[in-house]
Image (cartoon, rainbow, N blue to C red):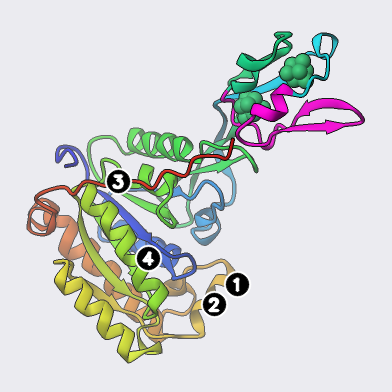
Amino acid sequence: MPAVFGPPEVVVASGKGGVGKSTVSAAIAIEAARAGHRVVAADADAEAPNLHIVLGVKEWESEEPFHEGRIAYIERGKCTECGICAQVCPFKAVEVINGHHLINEMICEGCLTCALACPEKAIRYRVNVLAGRLRVGVTRYGFRLVSGEIVPGRPNSGKLVTEVKNRAKAILGSEGVLIIDAAAGIGCQVVSSLTGSHIAVLVAEPTPASLHDLARVRALTKHFGMAAAVVINKADLSAEWAAKIREYAREEGMPILGEVPYDDAVPRAVAEGVPVTEAYPGSPAAKAIREVAKAVAEEILPNWLSWYEKYRVKEPHPYTPIIIRPEL
Ligand code: SF4
Ligand code: SF4
């Protein structure tokens, strides 16, 4: 169960990508700021960060490198090209180019199996490799956004997301609300986003795939003992599947915060890099999303502890990850 002292942390998540999560995150952050809350937003999708575009961050006020992990390399003079390292590497990171064994830095996970196996002790490693960047900027709505960006091909995006959250919490201090836009799916970035957070806003579409993925991300929120609510986006696409999502939410004890109709204004606003609630405030989707954001800003946040207590999972569920072992 998350600690209930300190400011609330609201995570907007969805098991599936492309369902409007960043649009909802941006609207909640803007509406919370307008309602007088001290807001810090965190873009927790380090592999494809884009909340800074939606929220109009023109330039970063601070940027710093994020170093993490190890990369192995072969000392040419010691290597006899025996090939053992290529045989033992679980990630197939050792390649042979022009007869020389080389480690592909984009693939190497730094496990050092090869270093242990090399009979010539020819494998060394670099530590604290540049793995990404951590940026802080001021949005056009006046609150700060913290955003991480992982170097393409580097692992540890979940750890970078933890750094993003820690920096956002440090900026927020003891008062206000942290709004976190999680990555799609249920991977390590999402786990880092949910860890220690209180409220999950789960965005779903009325499709079989989205309901399936909603259940997967719901399992994670149950593991972390969070309180969760649902937003159905493009709710009029399928009456049948919208009803199934409502039914699932009811069974899971998750209130529906709102239903957003399909609306061409949303992709137009995305193309313009502006939240639909700001670009096309009179559109049906913008009105519905603003209602969702107002529900969070004006009904949940002012008395968030009682809302959290009402909807939180009382017995956190065990979560058993599926472990896929690399082929040896
Ligand atoms: S195991 Fe060692 S000696 Fe053999 S190819 Fe790899 S680096 Fe070279
Ligand atoms: S065995 Fe591990 S450290 Fe060595 S190349 Fe493969 S992934 Fe990198």
Location of the C terminus (image quadrant): top right
Task: Verify CB contact (< 8 Å) between mark 1 and mark 2.
Answer: yes
Please indicate whether residue 189 sits to the left or right of residue 155 in the image: left
Between 154 and 311, the one nearer to me in the picture: 154
The amino acid on which the numbered mark 4 sits, given as a three-letter code, is: Asp
Between 75 and 24, the one nearer to me in the picture: 75
- According to the image, label 1 marks what residue? 271
Disc 2 residue crowd, few under 14, some 14–19, many 20+, Cα 10 Å: few
- According to the image, label 3 marks what residue? 320
The amino acid on which the numbered mark 1 sits, given as a three-letter code, is: Ala
Q: Which mark is residue 267?
A: 2
Q: Which mark is residue 213?
A: 4
Could you say where residue 187 lies in the image, as x and y percent from the top left? 43, 49
Task: Verify CB contact (< 8 Å) between mark 1 and mark 4.
Answer: no
Could you say where residue 255 lies in the image, as x and y percent from the top left? 17, 70
Q: Quadrant of residue 209?
A: bottom left
The amino acid on which the numbered mark 3 sits, given as a three-letter code, is: Thr
95 in magenta: yes
Real-space CA distance between mark 4 and mark 3, rounded to the nearest whole angstrom:
16 Å
Q: Of helix, strand and loop, which one carries label 1?
A: helix
